[in-house]
Structure formats: structure tokens, C-alpha cells
């Protein structure tokens, strides 16, 4: 809905409980359709003026598979804002491209806490990549905050899911805890793990004892056979 409104040449605000009249709004961004500096990649934006920062322009554009936001400030005129925005947009088009990376993540683990239910702010991570870098060289990784401790709060930031080229980070989206996890949960998990470990040791011990008895019986039968054969 926001994109539809900001990209429309004209938008009419319907009647509200504050006013019975409809209020028409016109898109005066100088790089949108029917404007003198029209660029087909520009979706829309907003200009504004205040004394401290003078002329300012926010521009939303989509090009090379990437949605971008450009902000120009402290311009002496809006024409200068437009020229600077065009330079930034052209620089991106000439040197970069965008890729979408699926974020399929529902659990993370640390050395001390296993299977923490998580979600990411974005289901698709957009990364900005230099044109000299092939898409197959882009990797993804999970980077968790050092020393995550219990209790973990609902929506707590635990780290980031990030796209990288070598050591360069190209894009990130935060990783959040789905729900609160108390210390008691860890105690319960530790008890379950301890019981499973004891059960496994018991199974291994029983198998060892059975194997030992079978070996003794086999050796006894072998000795009895040798004694019979010697007679």
C-alpha cells in the first residue's frame, strides 16, 4: 500500500472523522512520471525544506534487482538534490547489482544452549554486490552474539544472518528469539541429556556383558571339543 501511494501521481485521502472533505495529494517528486527529471527506475519519494538542512530529497528506486533509498541533504536547491540523486543512482547501476537470498532458519544452538527457536526480520535477504563479483561466490552464515546466557527474552536479538563475499559483509538481517527461555528449561534439558547418557551407558554395559558371556561359552565349548578329540 505504501508503494502504491508514494508512486501514484495523485492520491486522494478519503473522508475521516476529522474532516468530511476528501483531500487530494499530488506527487511532486521531480524524478517520477510526468516530471522534468523522470527516471523509469524511480518509484517515488518526498522533498522537504527546513532552515538547518535546507533542501532535502528522499528517493525510492528499484534497479538491478534491488530496492534502494537515496537521501540527499543540505542542497542549495531541489534541482541540486535531483542531480546528486541521479549521480548516486547511476553509480549504483554502473557498479552494483542486487541478489535475493532465502533465509530458512528456525533454530540456532550455542555450546551451552541447544535448539533455540528463532525467527529473522526478513524471509528474503537482499544483498548489494559489486558487478565484478559472480553470484556463486556469495556465501551466507549465522553470526551469533558472544556468550548468550539464560534467561533469553522473547524477541531478544541473538545475532545476524548475513551474506558475505570473503570477509566483506554484503547484507544482514537480525535473528530474534521466538519466545522466552528460562533457566529451568536448561536444567530440564540437562537432566534429560544425563538420563539419555546413563541409558546409553547401561545399554553398552549390557551388550558388553552379553558379549563376554558368549565368548566364555564359546571358549568352553572349544575346550570341550578339544578334550573329546584328544580321547
Image (cartoon, rainbow, N blue to C red):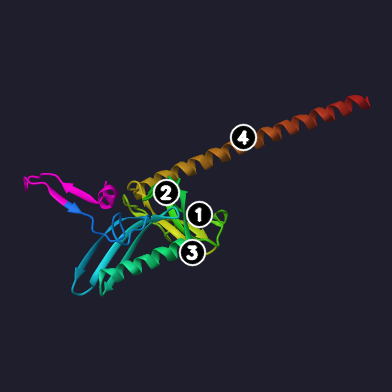
Give the distance between the C-alpha atoms of the residues marked 1 and 3, in whole angstroms: 22 Å
Relative horizontal placement of residue 39, taking residue 136 as reference (left or right):
left
- Which one is in front in this view, the residue at disc 2 or the one at disc 1? 2
Task: Say if 23 sits above or below 54 in the image.
Answer: above
Q: At x 61% / y 38%, what residue is drawn? A: 204
Q: Circle 3 — which element?
A: helix
Q: Nearer the viewer, residue 219 or 132?
A: 132
Please identify the quarter of the rendering in which residue 49 is found. Answer: bottom left
Give the distance between the C-alpha atoms of the residues marked 2 and 1, in whole angstroms: 12 Å
Disc number for residue 47: none
Q: Circle 2 — which element?
A: strand
- What residue span does the magenta drawing correspond to? 1-24
- Which one is in front in this view, the residue at disc 4 or the one at disc 3? 3
> Label 1, on which residue?
140
Mark 4 or mark 2, earlier in chain: 2
> Label 4, on which residue?
206
Q: Circle 4 — which element?
A: helix
Q: At x 32% / y 48%, what residue is drawn? A: 180
Which quadrant is home to the C terminus?
top right
Q: Crowding near pointer 2: few (<14 within 10 Å), some, many (20+)? A: some
Disc number for residue 124: 2
Q: Nearer the viewer, residue 107 or 42?
A: 42
Q: At x 54% / y 54%, what residue is drawn? A: 135
Give how far across and how far down residue 230 sits, in percent.
93, 27
Mark 3 or mark 2, earlier in chain: 3
Give how far across and how far down residue 101 sits, in percent.
47, 50
Give the distance between the C-alpha atoms of the residues marked 1 and 4, in whole angstroms: 46 Å
Give the distance between the C-alpha atoms of the residues marked 4 and 2, in whole angstroms: 51 Å
> Label 3, on which residue?
95
Give how far across and how far down residue 92 sits, in percent.
44, 63
Give the distance between the C-alpha atoms of the residues marked 4 and 3, in whole angstroms: 67 Å
CB atoms at circles 1 and 4 under 8 Å apart?
Answer: no
Amino acid at each position: 500500500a505504501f508503494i502504491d501511494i508514494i508512486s501514484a501521481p495523485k492520491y486522494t485521502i478519503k473522508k475521516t472523522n476529522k474532516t468530511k472533505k476528501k483531500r487530494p495529494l499530488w506527487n511532486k517528486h521531480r524524478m517520477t512520471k510526468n516530471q522534468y527529471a523522470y527516471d523509469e527506475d524511480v518509484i517515488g519519494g518526498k522533498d522537504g525544506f527546513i532552515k538547518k538542512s535546507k533542501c532535502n530529497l528522499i528517493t525510492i528506486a528499484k534497479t538491478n534487482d534491488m530496492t534502494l533509498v537515496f537521501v540527499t541533504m543540505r542542497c542549495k536547491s531541489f534541482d541540486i538534490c535531483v542531480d546528486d540523486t541521479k549521480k548516486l543512482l547511476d553509480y549504483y547501476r554502473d557498479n552494483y547489482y542486487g541478489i535475493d537470498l532465502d533465509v530458512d532458519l528456525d533454530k540456532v544452538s550455542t555450546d551451552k544452549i541447544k535448539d533455540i527457536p528463532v525467527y529473522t526480520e526478513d524471509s528474503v535477504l537482499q544483498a548489494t554486490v559489486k558487478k565484478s563479483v559472480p553470484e556463486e561466490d556469495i556465501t551466507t552464515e549465522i553470526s551469533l552474539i558472544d556468550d548468550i546466557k539464560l534467561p533469553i527474552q522473547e524477541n531478544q536479538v541473538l545475532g545476524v544472518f548475513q551474506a558475505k563475499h570473503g570477509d566483506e559483509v554484503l547484507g544482514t538481517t537480525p535473528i530474534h528469539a521466538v519466545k522466552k527461555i528460562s533457566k529451568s528449561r536448561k536444567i530440564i534439558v540437562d537432566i534429560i541429556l544425563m538420563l539419555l547418557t546413563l541409558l546409553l551407558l547401561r545399554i553398552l554395559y549390557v551388550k558388553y556383558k552379553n558379549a563376554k558371556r558368549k565368548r566364555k561359552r564359546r571358549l568352553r565349548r572349544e575346550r570341550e571339543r578339544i578334550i573329546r578329540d584328544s580321547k
